[in-house]
Image (spheres, grey):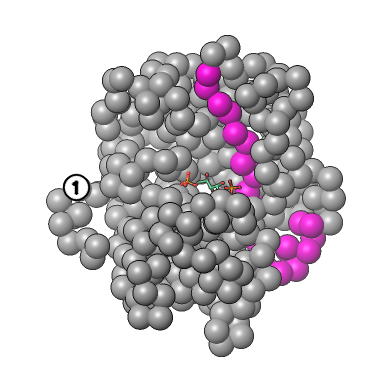
Amino acid sequence: MNADILKKTAKQMVAGGKGIIAADESASTCQKRFDSVGLECTEENRRLYRTTMFESEGLGQYISGVILYDETIRQKAGDGTPVSELLAKKGILPGIKVDAGAKELALHPGEKVTEGLDGLRERLAEYSAMGAKFAKWRAVITIGQGIPSDACLHANAHALARYAALCQEADIVPMVEPEVLIDGDHSLERCMEVSLAALQKTFEELKGQDVLMEGTILKASMVISGKKAAKQSSVQEVAAATVKYLKETVPANLAGVVFLSGGQGDEQATAHLDAMNKIGGLPWPLSFSYSRAIQNPVLKKWAENPAQNAKAAQDILLFRSKMNSLAAQGTYSSEMENDRPY
Ligand code: 5MM
């Protein structure tokens, strides 16, 4: 493990108000996204759509890294440039999703544990040779009647810590993602309780495996009421609660925190990030690692006419990336949305 390399990469991922695009949808998730806009989910369409995004002129002003899927890191742009090289030329760090997905947790109905540790050392070496500088592993925590159980929190936190240690051994920055799902009718207070427990466990396990905090990025979910909750939380409530749970659980020497959007709308996810940064006074940069909240309008535009809409889709990507970059610096305002190109 080279601590200097890890610290430098981790710092670069959250520097200057830049953030991450999560483009690591697995084949089944991609199928759902493409189905929703009437696009055929072929390998060639996935390649075309993703390379169109990555070719956007000036993307590196707002974006520090992109999380790729195994299929994508092996693909090339139209001119034959490998995807990771295409990103690197723009000053964007290529990242890679390395988990093998969330599977049913034995003896715990309704709960999941993320798999993928077997053979991970070898896969990391291969990804590193292909240019990956950071990696992501997503654990999924569901809020429901009597869940999450301690068993679920523990199993997921332990796997995250084992993955993070393997990444650092290979000089790859781990992006640790314990996602508390927004699905359900739970209150913001219940989300707070579960989010605190999930992060406490995660950092306990990371510490137990001697993971270097300065070389680690947390990909966090926000503290928010469930999608079906009767009372929906306000932007200020989400920002205050999320800042509070991070302060209580995240070590001050962690390199940075980026958020997932988890099913929030695009403007909503931007407004939440901005409100948190306006509160400020935190020891780590707070930025974004959105998939749906960045890509939804981009994919919609591209799908309308892939042969003609490349530039229009890229303009939307640049606009949302800029809005989120401003939010990562606490300088966004909702009036800016009046200029949106969609
Ligand atoms: C893009 O979706 C990622 C991979 O999910 P699957 O393994 O289910 O295909 C996901 O991990 C993503 O990186 C995060 O959840 C953030 O995405 P959102 O849409 O929540 O911002």
**Circle 1: is it few (<14), some (14-19), or many (20+) Cα within 10 Å?**
few
Residue at 46% of width from left, 30% of height from top? 183
The residue tagged 1 is 334
Q: Which residues are magenta?
A: 123-144
Image quadrant assignment for residue 163: top right
130 within the magenta span? yes
Residue at 33% of width from left, 31% of height from top? 239
Asked if residue 84 shows in the view, the reply is no
Residue 155 sits above or below residue 342 on the image:
above
Image quadrant assignment for residue 253: top right
Q: Nearer the viewer, residue 143 or 217?
A: 143
Q: Nearer the viewer, residue 195 or 44?
A: 44
Name the spot of residue 38 as percent of width and height, x first.
Answer: 43, 62
Q: Is residue 199 left or right of residue 104?
A: left
Residue type at mark 1 is Ser
Name the spot of residue 97 as percent of width and height, x first.
Answer: 64, 53
Q: Nearer the viewer, residue 253 or 262?
A: 262
Residue 267 sits above or below residue 48 on the image:
above
Q: Residue furthest bottom?
A: 79
